[in-house]
Amino acid sequence: MPIGTTVTGVPFQYSGSLATGLTVSFEKSTLKIKPEIVYIIRHEITERSPVLMGANRKPLVTDSVGETLAEKYGVSPQVMSYVLPLLVEEGFCTVSDRNPFVIHRK
């Protein structure tokens, strides 16, 4: 199973891909991220760059991609922790190296 690293340096295991959807594995559970959610994240970054990441669930980070996911699509902003590093790895965008994490479209 591939291993990714969040922007805060925490390793995570996943299967799938950005194109087909991801399954992030934790010790006692999994998080499934549909390809449609990855598309929404890509779109938000492209349209709003530079934009805040906003992976916090509570409180939501105002005017962030995570806030949009939670409020418009009912998706946990936590998915940003796993999708964003893979987008950076593929060269789609960059992210600042400290909080608040700001995403820039390449």
Image: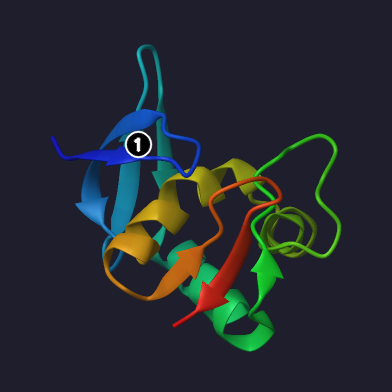
Q: Residue furthest top?
A: 28
Q: Residue furthest front?
A: 97
| Coordinates of residue 45 in the picture (x, y in percent) | 58, 76
| Coordinates of residue 71 in the picture (x, y in percent) | 80, 58
The residue tagged with tag 1: helix, strand or loop? strand
The front one of 70 and 5 is 5
In the image, is 11 to the left or to the right of 93? left
Residue 40 shows up from this direction: no
Residue at image location 37% in from the left, 64% down from the top:
87
Q: Splitting the image into 4 quarters, where does residue 103 fall?
A: bottom right
| Coordinates of residue 1 in the picture (x, y in percent) | 13, 35
In the image, is 17 to the left or to the right of 54? left
| Coordinates of residue 95 in the picture (x, y in percent) | 52, 61
Q: Is residue 100 above or below residue 8?
A: below
Q: Splitting the image into 4 quarters, where does residue 64 fall?
A: bottom right
Q: Residue furthest left?
A: 1
Residue 90 shows up from this direction: yes
Residue at image location 44% in from the left, 73% down from the top:
93
Residue at image location 74% in from the left, 63% down from the top:
68
Total tally of numbered discs in the picture = 1
Q: Amino acid under label 1?
A: Val
Residue at image location 66% in from the left, 76% down from the top:
50
Q: Splitting the image into 4 quarters, where does residue 88 fall?
A: bottom left
Q: Which quarter of the figure is the C terminus placed in?
A: bottom left
Dot 1, crowdedness within 10 Å: few (<14), some or many (≥20)?
many
Q: Which residue is mark 1?
A: 24
Q: Is residue 59 above or below residue 21?
A: above
